[in-house]
Amino acid sequence: MTELSYLLYLLAFIIGSVLGLLISYKKHGEAFIINKIDIVSLIIAIIGWILLFNYALLPFISSYILIAIALFLIALVFGMRPGYGRKETFLGIIISAIIWIISYILF
């Protein structure tokens, strides 16, 4: 069963990366010149990293499904054109780590 879950994770990440690249090329036709945070990408990154770090907080959904969704969302931001998505990814990791630490202390 673990091999099947790894395949699911790999497919989710690859599909997310390809879709992120396609969406990024449609959204940003130019090279990296926009130096501001994209709100939609930030929300996607935060949700993805929160699901990846804190999937145990949702025990009523299978962890395989949550991790696959998290990897898909993370890959959407990772797969963007070079230069785009790096700030959003960093903020998503920081926010989800803070939530993980708070949940670890409380529970």
Image (cartoon, rainbow, N blue to C red):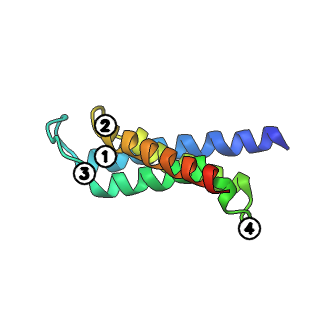
Callouts 1 and 4 close, C-beta under 8 Å: no
**Residue ID at (34%, 45%):** 88
The residue closer to the viewer here, 74 or 13, is 74
Horizontal relation, residue 106 to residue 44: left or right? right
Graded by Cα atoms within 10 Å as few (under 14), some (14 to 19) or many (20 or more), the crowding at tag 4 reads few
Secondary structure under tag 3 reads helix
**Residue ID at (26%, 52%):** 38
Furthest residue toward left: 33
Compared with 63, 4 (above or below) is above
Image coordinates of residue 101 in percent, x first then y, are 56, 47
**Residue ID at (34%, 50%):** 23
Image coordinates of residue 15 in percent, x first then y, are 53, 46
Graded by Cα atoms within 10 Å as few (under 14), some (14 to 19) or many (20 or more), the crowding at tag 3 reads few
For label 2, the residue is 81
Amino acid residing under circle 3? Lys
For label 3, the residue is 27
For label 1, the residue is 24
Q: Is residue 79 visible?
A: no
For label 4, the residue is 60
**Residue ID at (65%, 54%):** 55
Amino acid residing under circle 2? Arg
Callouts 1 and 2 close, C-beta under 8 Å: yes
Horizontal relation, residue 29 to residue 52: left or right? left
Mark 4–mark 2 Cα distance, whole angstroms, equals 36 Å
